[in-house]
Image (tube, coloured by chain):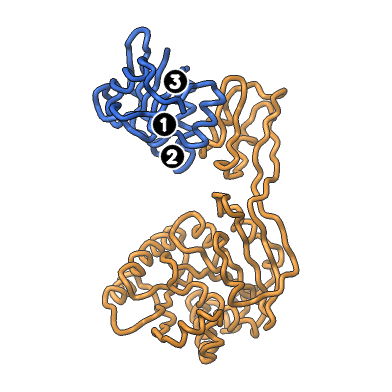
Chain colours: A blue, B orange
Amino acid sequence: MIVIISAQQAQLDGPIDVRFGRCSWLLRIDTDTHQWEAFQNPGINQSGGAGVAAAQFAIDQHANAVISGDFGPNAANALRAAGVEMYRLVDGASTPQQALDLYTQGKLIAF
Amino acid sequence: MRIAVASGKGGTGKTTVATSLALSLAPRGNVWYVDCDVEAPNGHIFLKPQFNQALPAGIRIPKIDPELCSLCGRCVEVCQFHALAKIGKTILVFPQLCHGCGSCTWNCPEQAITEQFTPIGSLELGRTESGLNFAHGILTISEPMATPVIRQLKRQQQFTDCDVIVFDAPPGASCSVVETLRGVDFVLLVTEPTPFGLHDLKQMLGIVSEMGLPAGLVINRESGAYPPLAELCASAKLPVLMRIPFNRQYAEGLAKGQTLIQIAPEYVKLFQEVYDQISTILNLPGSQAEPNQEKP
């Protein structure tokens, strides 16, 4: 499974970013191999359409699920059309690692 | 001559100046007042025109023929606004992000894209009782993009053979203002002697200088000296073409929907002088409204 999490830093134990389209980093995590990689969000500096740009990135990365604080209508439409699951952060998920753990335990809320 | 009235800060007196300037010039020729503040047009409240023409304003949004589309993704790549996304075996269009620029259509190697006119607002044209031509654009509520409506408003055929057009610009210092200023001969800036007015005047001067447009200033609601504004005018070589003092009577009249020249008719002559000063700055022959006449 490929999971993408929005983050403020390129670290699994750094602060999470509650914004999807405007987050600094998108962490791509392979839950099977436990390998992960950080990508700069292509949407961050766009004047508009940041959510779609970030969603397109997640889709191109073949993500199965995306975790963030919330999803705008355009990003959500794109991700939904691509069949990418969306999950919202809950209390206790302040780092990407914690969010990933809660996700694997099935404790995140589906968007 | 095309004059844009702009300010940066809202509520400095753009519409007060633009409506009275246009009314003062109307007896001299064929004059248009054009309200480009399409998100909240208010010139009609003061000028009370009779409308005789209404047109739709819109943008052309791409429609992709799935039979012809080879899913190459070129359209997604060229769209600067992320209005297109490639998802599996489809290209998704986000109409609210589309600027109608046509890049996707132009770049599609399969010619799979056609464009569909999608209304986002309307234009209304008419005339006031005193013979001033009037036009404004209205952006439909919830539509996010004002610039296409402004662009279509400014392109009206009727404007081509007139003597003077006064464009009443939207507030702010963003795309809508730039769209309004594009192609004008002169920018009449309106400010108030406050730190906020000064700050936004500087923003406007940045835009005006980048666009290479000549500008002059109207200081509205003046009461006493405000040195920072005088210093800015001196350093930016910005000529002050009119000063409107703070006056409770003006405020009361404007609040009732009267124009400044209705409240204080002596301003007719003063606005005509502003126009003459602009003609001098632009080196136009005579002081009358004769924009089509070539310089000898």
Q: Nearer the viewer, mark 1 or mark 3?
A: 3
Quarter placement of the C terminus of chain B = bottom right
- In the displayed structure image, the side of residue A38 where residue B103 appears, left or right: right
Give above or below for A16 relative to B44. Answer: above
The answer to whether the residue labelled 1 contacts the one labelled 3, judged by CB atoms less than 8 Å apart, is no
Q: Dot 1: what SS?
A: loop
- In the displayed structure image, the side of residue A70 where residue B49 appears, left or right: right
Spot occupied by residue B198 in the image (x, y as percentages of width and height): 33, 69
Q: Please, what is the three-letter code of the amino acid marked with disc 2?
A: Gln
- Rounded to the nearest angstrom, the CA distance separating label 2 from label 1 is 8 Å
Q: Which residue is mark 1?
A: A42
> Which numbered disc flags the more N-terminal residue, 2 or 3?
2
Please tell me if label 2 and label 1 are on a single chain: yes
Q: Which residue is mark 3?
A: A65
Give above or below for B188 relative to A109. Answer: below
Q: Residue at x 51, y 26 (%)?
A: A79
Farthest residue in the top direction? A33
Q: Which residue is mark 2?
A: A46
Farthest residue in the bottom direction? B266
Q: Residues within 10 Å of mark 1 (few under 14, many from 20)?
A: many
Chain identifier of the residue bearing label 3 in the image: A
Quarter placement of the N terminus of chain B = bottom right
Q: Residues within 10 Å of mark 2 (few under 14, many from 20)?
A: some
Spot occupied by residue B131 in the image (x, y as percentages of width and height): 69, 81
